[in-house]
Amino acid sequence: MSVVFGGVCQIGYVVRDIEKAMQHWSDVLGVGPWFYKAAVGTTEFRYYGKASELPDLSIALANSGGVQIELIQQRNDTPSLYLDSLKQSGEGMQHIAYWTDRFDEYAAALRAGGFVEGHGGRMGMRGRFAYYLHPDLPGNIVEISEMAGGKGEYFATIAAAAKDWDGTDPIRRIGAPQ
């Protein structure tokens, strides 16, 4: 538990094949159900403080106990920490995340501690996000995520689904054509 930010809420993984990753996590590790969005719809993005093209992202979310697991596949070559992590370390754990309604305060605390924003932005109306790196901890990324625009309710729905999940319907496609 962080005395500054509370408990870690999410662990994020960068993957090259999100469908394969979701299947592995549900079949082999028993984690699910996955709430999968093939096209996230990032509306603002910056890379190391400069406005950037939008990354084309697919994201899947599921809970394992009280921690949310996020799988991220970037489908274009827009500069991002997701691609940086894949190039440096390959697939795997990429970040831990703290959720907050005090986004600016958390960001200021990270910067005061020597962290630099690697990338950040907004996805739709669901609040801001920012990923921070520290020069003394290469490869360790901390995300802060603003719980605005219904994000908190959405994340609560995912946690509730995992609590009583019996293994059926492991991948729930959000926004997919019916």
Image: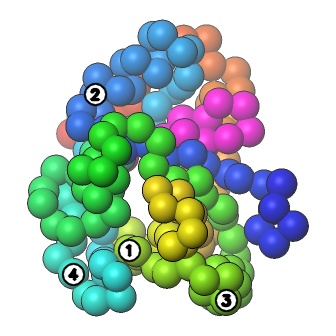
Q: Nearer the viewer, mark 1 or mark 3?
A: 3
Q: Which mark is residue 19?
A: 2
171 on left or right of 5: left
Instruction: Report the residue marked by disc 3.
Output: 112
Residues at circles 4 and 1 in contact by the CB criterion of under 8 Å: yes
User: Which mark sits nearer the N-terminus, 4 or 1?
Assistant: 4
What separation in Å lies between label 4 and label 1 (alpha carbons)? 9 Å
Quarter in which the C terminus is drawn: top left
User: Which mark sits nearer the N-terminus, 2 or 3?
Assistant: 2
Q: Which residue is drawn at 13% across and 56% down?
A: 76
User: From what the image shows, is residue 35 above or below residue 129?
Assistant: above
Instruction: Report the residue marked by disc 1.
Output: 119
Q: Does the magenta stretch include residue 60?
A: yes
Residues at circles 2 and 1 in contact by the CB criterion of under 8 Å: no
Which one is in front, 134 or 52? Answer: 134
Q: Which of marks 2 and 4 is in front?
A: 4
Question: What is the secondary structure assignment of the residue under circle 3?
Answer: helix
User: From what the image shows, is residue 166 above or below residue 80?
Assistant: above
User: Which mark sits nearer the N-terminus, 2 or 1?
Assistant: 2
User: From what the image shows, is residue 109 above or below residue 27?
Assistant: below
Identity of the amino acid at label 4?
Answer: Ser
User: Which mark sits nearer the N-terminus, 1 or 3?
Assistant: 3
What separation in Å lies between label 3 and label 4 (alpha carbons)? 25 Å
